[in-house]
Image (cartoon, rainbow, N blue to C red):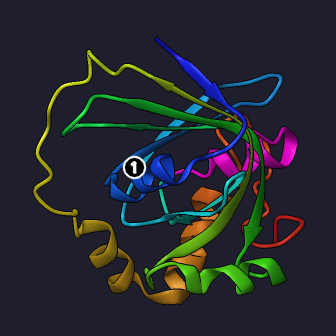
């Protein structure tokens, strides 16, 4: 049975800290809904109603485009071991790019990751837990290293060029502002 809360308890925050993967969903009023898996120790609860997550370079940049047009965001965690549970965080998010002052103030909360692109700041409006009885047991083996290795091999200049080529527009043609407030 689903339960709803107005904020994260210490127990739910601990559950989040133990998870190796989470899922982020965003959408604008028009266009495609985006749902992305995330990992690499990139999620931080900083208050009962606030969380940050670090975003690294990827093949698209839908979340940044969506959040700048419509801040709605849902983050979901699932228990793949132990007691079953699904935890959803509903709220409004902001995006901080590498050139924003807020980005600089929060980036040290995370491990240093090559290709770090943005930080998302989620104001949590609703917390919901549900049973998770249908979520399978799964064993964590290790983090994948391909993205880190690829990003290091590219170097900063080639990553910047990659952002320019692949990350300045969403699949619906909306600017992400990854390089600044206008496409250069």
Q: Position of residue 102 (x, y in %)?
A: 80, 78
Residue 72 location, quadrant = top right
Q: Position of residue 50 (x, y in %)?
A: 71, 56
Q: Quadrant of the C terminus?
A: bottom right
- The structure residue drawn at horizontal position 48% and vertical position 46%, both measured from the top left corner, is 12
Q: Position of residue 81 (x, y in %)?
A: 19, 39
Q: Which residue is the site of mark 1?
A: 15
SS category of the residue bearing label 1: helix
User: Compared with residue 129, is residue 64 higher up or lower down, i.e. above or below?
Assistant: below
Tell me if 71 is positioned left or right of 119 in this view: right
Is residue 72 found inside the magenta-colored segment of the image? yes
Residue with the most extreme front position? 10
Residue 48 location, quadrant = bottom right
- The structure residue drawn at horizontal position 76% and vertical position 60%, both measured from the top left corner, is 95
Q: Nearer the viewer, residue 80 or 130?
A: 130
Over which residues does the magenta segment extend? 60-73
Tell me if 32 is positioned left or right of 130 in this view: right
């Amino acid at each position: 049975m689903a339960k709803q809360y107005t904020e994260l308890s210490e127990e739910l925050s601990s559950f989040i800290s133990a998870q190796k993967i989470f899922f982020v969903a965003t959408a604008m009023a028009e266009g495609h809904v985006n749902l992305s898996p995330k990992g690499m120790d990139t999620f931080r609860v900083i208050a009962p109603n606030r969380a940050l997550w670090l975003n690294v370079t990827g093949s698209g940049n839908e979340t940044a485009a969506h959040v700048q047009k419509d801040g709605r965001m849902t983050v979901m965690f699932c228990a793949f071991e132990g007691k079953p549970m699904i935890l959803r965080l509903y709220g409004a998010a902001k995006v901080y790019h590498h050139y924003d002052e807020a980005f600089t103030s929060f980036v040290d909360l995370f491990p240093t990751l090559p290709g770090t692109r943005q930080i998302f700041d989620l104001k949590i409006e609703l917390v919901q837990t549900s049973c998770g009885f249908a979520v399978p047991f799964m064993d964590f083996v290790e983090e994948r290293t391909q993205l880190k290795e690829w990003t290091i091999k590219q170097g900063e200049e080639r990553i910047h060029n990659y952002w320019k080529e692949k990350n300045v527009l969403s699949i619906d043609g909306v600017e992400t502002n990854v390089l600044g407030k206008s496409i250069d």
